[in-house]
Image (cartoon, grey):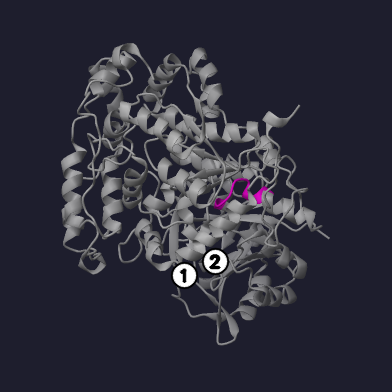
């Protein structure tokens, strides 16, 4: 197992990763562009692209922005609407398992920014069936949510004939440096299949002979629009992170300040800014991910901070160690929702366990990494703010007493 | 005149598909079978898969992976990476390849090529060279500069002598720069060669491929930009057809009648909302 000599990613990263001769990973190399590129020029480029999509007849929205209320949505909407003067349609796929903070953040978003919001609510019982099926088949309880969140904006773009979708951060670029920022990579169905959906498109599962017929019916809702429809509307999805120097922490702090975005303390990571909308994302889902790949969200968050020079590598290792084995608090709740026992849960999970990074590996590399070490920034604000209100009503959440919000 | 081909050049580092910048920086893309599955849908004319680490590691490209992935496509597939004997060629052809690309293997020892041509026919032997401009003339480098460079015309003469079916020329200087193909280089090759040329290195937008096709009768191999956009190959083909280039158009993904900007990329179109239709 190879570990990057600058950040904490290792050769088992599910996206794939390349190490150069100095033992620095491709993600860190692409991250260097954040300090080397002229971001004013990049911004100008974004402005040109967005201008091209402004609807001159004023009969349609200019673009679609997929939002969840739990991540970069505030920043993306603020940038696209307020800074570049676009008229966006906000689109949200309800991933269920919502926290009250998440629901509140999403409603606050449309109110504060004055935007229309369309939300797709899949029948909760079928969502449950899908979660059960995909967990059994390839060990993922979140697949249907990834599938829905990545396809619903595209389906709407085709139906409403809105040719531009503006996404926030490109995960592949951010984590493993899949593309240079200058590549201006766009949304593709291929990326969705391989990296968002772990290699299984709904269309593939539909052909699975072992897939129960009622699940097949549900899968149809997640089908990608046909290639012909994409061609007809000329749908394109761009990523803001290719044009704006992305710094998730600072951006969130601005949003907390300006638009009263609420943070939510996370069970399995130190970063309270992201995924506060979901009871299971940085929780049961993350726990499963860790059991499968030895890879969890706290690692992504630590790497982001290390690369932006606000956290030393040693501190990062400490945090990863601290959070990786944390209990998934909502496991019991989730199992009763899925209606399976914890015994069955672990039995299924064990089938998908792979080679894991041993935390020792990080220490071994620690001694060798002097040359590639990043110096910490002097005045970077290191600590994460919190303004969550969960302490007032700790048990209220979306599956409280059988209500699915 | 034969139609000019748009060829997908897929680089592997071990089992991982990568982008390449100047033969130096490599960025991870993903799995080969998924890349091929989509290229087939996007109407690519041919595919070349090269394992750029194979020779360095004294290995060949992973034939098992090629075998599984080759089931995803129906267009001609060329395989390269560490191929240096007749036995390797046989293995490649048995595992789904239609042709093999030979670079270091030929540079090192051209003895086996003639035998391979006799056995399998020249149509399945693609001789490949990585070329660099030094002091005003072009040189072929191989295996990460391990061997002494030779002049490109000398290399070409040898390649034709041993019976190459096609010549694949990749410009090291232009690789990943998105500045367009090295026209001078490709012109030299075209002038001195009697076999079909595949030009690679530097394609950054559809216009660059038109530029190549305008001047040189060759096939265009595109690498990094394949991975950047939805329907990447069909978009390029739509532009080339619109510009009356002699290419096999994309049948199902028809972008021929779209409006393109000077780079050959799509210009945004405006649609009325369905809410306003009566």
- Coordinates of residue A91 in the picture (x, y in percent): 51, 33
**As rendered, which of A307 and A26 lies closer to the eye?**
A307
Q: Which residue carries the number 2 mark?
A: B103
Q: Is residue B16 magenta?
A: no
Q: Please give left or right for residue B90 compared with residue A133 in the image.
A: right
Q: Is residue B198 visible?
A: yes
Q: Is residue B83 visible?
A: no
Q: Quadrant of residue A312?
A: bottom left
Residue contact at pointers 1 and 2, CB within 8 angstroms: yes
Q: Residue at x 32, y 15 (%)?
A: A337
Q: Residue at x 32, y 46 (%)?
A: A257
Q: Residue at x 36, y 46 (%)?
A: A258
Tell me the CA gap for discs 1 and 2: 8 Å
Vertical order, A252 against B25 (above or below) = above
- The quarter of the rendered structure image containing the C terminus of chain B is top right
Q: Which residue carries the number 1 mark?
A: B143
Element marked by disc 1: loop
Q: Which residues are magenta?
A: B227-234
Kindly identify which chain the residue marked by label 1 belongs to.
B
**As rendered, which of B19 and B114 lies closer to the eye?**
B19
């Amino acid at each position: 197992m190879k570990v990057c000599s600058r950040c904490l990613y290792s050769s088992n990263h599910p996206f794939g990763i390349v190490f150069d001769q100095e033992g620095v990973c491709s993600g860190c190399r692409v991250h260097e562009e954040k300090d080397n590129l002229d971001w004013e020029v990049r911004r100008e480029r974004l402005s040109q692209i967005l201008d091209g999509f402004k609807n001159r007849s004023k009969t349609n929205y200019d673009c679609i922005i997929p939002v969840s209320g739990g991540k970069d949505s505030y920043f993306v909407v603020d940038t696209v609407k307020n800074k570049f003067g676009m008229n966006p349609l906000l689109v949200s796929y309800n991933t269920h398992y919502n926290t009250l903070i998440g629901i509140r953040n999403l409603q606050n978003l449309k109110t504060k920014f004055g935007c229309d919001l369309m939300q797709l609510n899949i029948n909760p019982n079928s969502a449950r069936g899908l979660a059960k099926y995909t967990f059994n088949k390839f060990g993922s309880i979140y697949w249907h949510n990834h599938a829905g969140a990545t396809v619903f904006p595209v389906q709407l773009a085709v139906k409403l004939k809105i040719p531009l979708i503006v996404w926030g951060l490109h995960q592949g670029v951010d984590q493993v440096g899949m593309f240079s920022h200058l590549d201006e990579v766009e949304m593709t169905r291929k990326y969705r299949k391989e990296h968002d959906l772990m290699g299984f498109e709904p269309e593939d599962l539909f052909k699975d002979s072992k897939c129960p017929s009622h699940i097949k019916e549900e899968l149809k809702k997640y089908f990608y629009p046909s290639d012909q429809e994409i061609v007809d509307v000329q749908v394109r999805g761009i990523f803001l992170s290719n044009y704006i120097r992305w710094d998730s922490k600072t951006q969130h702090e601005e949003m907390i300040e300006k638009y009263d975005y609420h943070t939510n303390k996370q069970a399995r990571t130190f970063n309270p800014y992201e995924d506060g909308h979901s009871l299971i994302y940085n929780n049961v889902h993350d726990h499963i991910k860790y059991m499968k790949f030895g890879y969890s969200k706290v690692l992504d968050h630590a790497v982001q901070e290390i690369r932006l020079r606000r956290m030393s590598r040693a501190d990062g290792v400490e945090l990863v160690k601290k959070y990786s084995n944390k209990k998934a608090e909502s496991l019991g709740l989730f199992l009763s929702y899925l209606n399976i026992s914890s015994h069955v849960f672990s039995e299924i999970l064990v089938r998908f366990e792979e080679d894991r990074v041993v935390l020792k590996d990080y220490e071994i590399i620690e001694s060798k990494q002097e040359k590639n070490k990043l110096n910490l920034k002097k005045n970077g604000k290191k600590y994460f703010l919190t303004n969550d209100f969960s302490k007032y009503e700790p048990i209220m959440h979306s599956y409280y007493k059988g209500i699915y919000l | 005149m034969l139609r000019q081909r748009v060829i997908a050049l897929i680089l592997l580092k071990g089992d991982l598909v990568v982008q390449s910048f100047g033969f130096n920086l490599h960025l991870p893309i993903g799995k080969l079978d998924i890349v091929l599955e989509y290229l087939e849908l996007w109407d690519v004319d041919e595919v070349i898969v090269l394992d750029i680490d194979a020779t360095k590691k004294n290995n060949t490209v992973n034939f098992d992976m090629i075998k599984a992935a080759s089931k995803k496509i129906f267009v001609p597939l060329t395989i390269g990476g560490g191929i240096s004997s007749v036995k390797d060629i046989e293995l490649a052809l048995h595992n789904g390849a239609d042709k093999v690309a030979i670079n270091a293997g030929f540079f090192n020892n051209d003895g086996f090529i003639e035998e391979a041509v006799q056995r399998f026919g020249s149509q399945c032997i693609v001789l490949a060279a990585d070329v660099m401009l030094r002091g005003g003339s072009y040189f072929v480098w191989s295996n990460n500069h391990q061997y002494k460079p030779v002049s490109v015309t000398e290399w070409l003469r040898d390649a034709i002598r041993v019976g190459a079916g096609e010549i694949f020329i990749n410009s090291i200087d232009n690789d990943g720069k998105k500045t367009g193909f090295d026209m001078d280089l490709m012109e030299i090759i075209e002038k001195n060669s009697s076999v079909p040329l595949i030009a690679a290195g530097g394609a950054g937008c559809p216009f660059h491929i038109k530029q190549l096709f305008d001047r040189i009768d060759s096939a265009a191999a595109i690498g990094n930009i394949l991975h950047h956009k939805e329907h990447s190959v069909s978009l390029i083909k739509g532009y080339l057809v619109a510009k009356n280039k002699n290419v096999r158009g994309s049948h199902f993904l028809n972008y021929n009648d779209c409006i393109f900007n000077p780079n050959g990329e799509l210009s945004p179109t405006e649609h009325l909302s369905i809410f306003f239709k009566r």
